[in-house]
Image: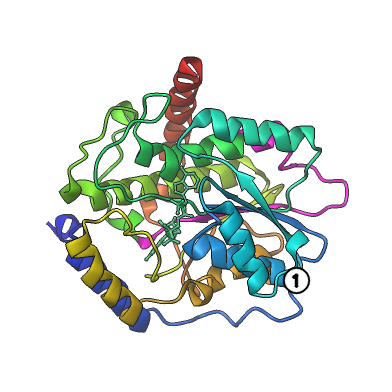
Amino acid sequence: MAALNKNHPLSAVLTGALDRFRVQRRLPALGADERLDGKLALVTGGASGLGFATSVDLARRGARVLLADCRDLERAHRRAVSLGVAPDRIEPLNVDLSDLRSSDRVAMDLARRGVCLDRLVLNAAVVPTAARSTPQGLDEMFVVNYLSSFALVTRLLDEGVLPRDRRDGEVPRVVFVASEAHRWAEDLALETIDRPRDGSPRRVLAWYATYKLMLATFAWELARRLSTEGTPQVAVFALCPGAMSTNIIRELPAPLRAPLKAVMRLFFQDPFVADEPVLYLTCSRSLEGRTAVYLHKMAPKDVDPRAADAEAGRALWEHSEAVLSRARGQG
Ligand SMILES: NC(=O)c1ccc[n+]([C@@H]2O[C@H](COP(=O)([O-])OP(=O)(O)OC[C@H]3O[C@@H](n4cnc5c(N)ncnc54)[C@H](OP(=O)(O)O)[C@@H]3O)[C@@H](O)[C@H]2O)c1
């Protein structure tokens, strides 16, 4: 019953608004000297909302940023420049994460260019009000919110774009933008993860929670696979930024969207404030040598036990590989 309530849009908005006051900061602010000069970051969903704020703020901390998105790339670049970012600090990267060929192509292009990523922020997500099919015949929300991250990370690792054994001893970081919603997801039904989704608008938040649980489960499995005796070769972190006033509700019907937008503007965080935990996980020196750290805003927490479970992580990994291999075969 609690799960059903949490997945009601009004309950989600109320929880988001209350979290602004309920979640106490437990970490210090990132020092001004904690910078990424000379480092390269890739941010998915970088053209809007949290991804855009993160891209701009990483560039302000010295990183060069590959801003990956499928729409509004030039506009995002112009906006970043108008906020004082040097034009060559942000490179727009066209990728449609709903099309596995597109994310595969981007990974291969980066490998051909000899790109070596220091930071990868997996941020893109959609909240569609109807089920839509991808070019590979999968559900778009499943692919953008979960499977594209699995596909991109595993391919970038295979191609050495995310190197596991850097000679300079630097440890790349992968940061997953998850959500506290992963806690109220129903248990994963792995046998049916690639089946067409029930696209009813009433169920959209339940699916959103499910894909966030998949993302957190994958992240913790990745952390285990990329560590040797507790030392990460690639560090893996995840976070919930808390409720933000962004375009995430862009697909809601206008009569619902307008009042909700007003509530969001009043009570939710600006993405340039909400990106603090993303910046912390990408830049903080205090996290050197660590992996599998989850922040809810600026408070460290455990992920849901289902996401931390090693058996569940292995099973999800195997199912995801199988789905991916079938989908790539359909190309
Ligand atoms: N907003 C919140 O209250 C909240 C709370 C907790 C967690 N989060 C998480 O925070 C992250 C960012 O969300 P946001 O609120 O900033 O929403 P947003 O403004 O809608 O940003 C999502 C980004 O993902 C991009 N995207 C969607 N489909 C894509 C595709 N097929 N290929 C490439 N990029 C695609 C969007 O591009 P287009 O604009 O072109 O569609 C957009 O730039 C998400 O993971 C979300 O789940 C949000």
**Whole-percent x and y of residue 311?**
43, 37
Compared across the picture, whether 61 is left or right of 211 comes to right
Q: Name the residue: 19% across, 56% down.
A: 3
Front position in the image: 281 or 305: 281
Q: Say above or below: 175 vs 199.
A: below
Compared across the picture, whether 7 is left or right of 136 comes to left
**Whole-percent x and y of residue 221?**
52, 42
Q: Name the residue: 29% across, 79% down.
A: 18
- List the single residue furthest toward the right: 167
Q: Name the residue: 79% across, 42% down.
A: 165
Front position in the image: 82 or 268: 82
Magenta residues: mostly which secondary structure?
loop
Q: Locate the N terminus by quadrant.
A: bottom left
What kind of residue is marked 1? Arg
- Residue 173 magenta-highlighted: yes
Which residue is under mark 1? 35
Instruction: Give the magenta-colored segment's residue range.
Output: 155-180
- Residue 109 magenta-highlighted: no
User: Does label 1 point to a residue whose CB lies under 8 Å from ligand 1?
Assistant: no
**Whole-percent x and y of residue 152?**
58, 38
Front position in the image: 190 or 138: 138
Compared across the picture, whether 258 is left or right of 69 comes to left
Compared across the picture, whether 132 is left or right of 278 comes to left
